[in-house]
Image (tube, rainbow, N blue to C red):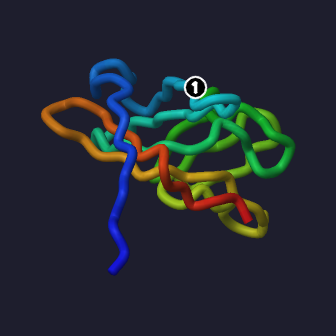
Amino acid sequence: MTADIRNWVHIGTLEDIPREGARCVKNGEMTIAVFRTAKDDVFALEDKCPHKNGPLSQGIVHDGCVTCPLHNWVISLETGAAQGADEGRTAAFPVRLEDGRILIDLSYSHEAV
């Protein structure tokens, strides 16, 4: 039997992130961008585009994706995968909301491939 061990960390509240915007948190050497959509869904990705390491937190949030500000790559907020003809992935972390509080599971990520 495998135990489901999670490391849920409270990183702020929903109101800390503007709609269709992002805020960053540090996890050791890694910066994680936490995104809020227009419908108040929250996602967390490593703040690094798989193309040229652009800061995804400074990109445009739209339609479940973020567009990198450097070269316009579109990245899925859910999976961290590049969309369209582009290939690559950035690490994505599970997120949950509890009474407006944002929690990220830092023990698990969909690793970049």
Which type of secondary structure does the marked residue at label 1 adopt? Answer: strand
The residue that mark 1 highlights is 26
Image quarter of the N terminus: bottom left
Q: Is residue 10 left or right of residue 105?
A: left
Q: Identify the residue at image location x=63%, y=27%.
A: 58
Q: Is residue 12 above or below residue 8?
A: above
Residue neighbourhood size for the residue with mark 1, other residues' Cα within 10 Å, grouped as few (<14), some (14–19), many (≥20): few
Q: Reply above or below: 82 against 27.
A: below
95 vs 2, nearest the viewer:
2
Total tally of numbered discs in the picture: 1
Q: Quadrant of the C terminus?
A: bottom right
Q: Identify whether 60 is placed above or below 113.
A: above
Q: Amino acid at mark 1?
A: Lys
Q: Which residue is the extreme one toward the right?
A: 52
At which x and y percent is residue 91? 62, 52
User: What x and y, as percent, mark residue 8?
Assistant: 35, 42
Quarter assignment of residue 85: bottom right
Report the residue that reaches farthest toward the top: 16
Q: Residue at x 80, y 39 (%)?
A: 53
- Identify the residue at the far front of this view: 1
Q: Residue at x 47, y 28 (%)?
A: 21
Residue nearer the viewer, 17 or 72? 17
Of 102 and 9, the residue lying toward us: 9
* Residue 86: x %, y % from top left: 78, 63
Residue 98: name its quadrant: top left
- Residue at the far bottom: name it: 1
| Lateral position of residue 66 relative to residue 13, left or right | right
Left or right of 113 in this view: 52 = right
Q: Nearer the viewer, residue 55 or 67?
A: 55
Q: Is residue 18 above or below residue 54?
A: above
Q: Position of residue 72 (x, y in %)?
A: 75, 44
For residue 2, which quarter of the picture?
Answer: bottom left
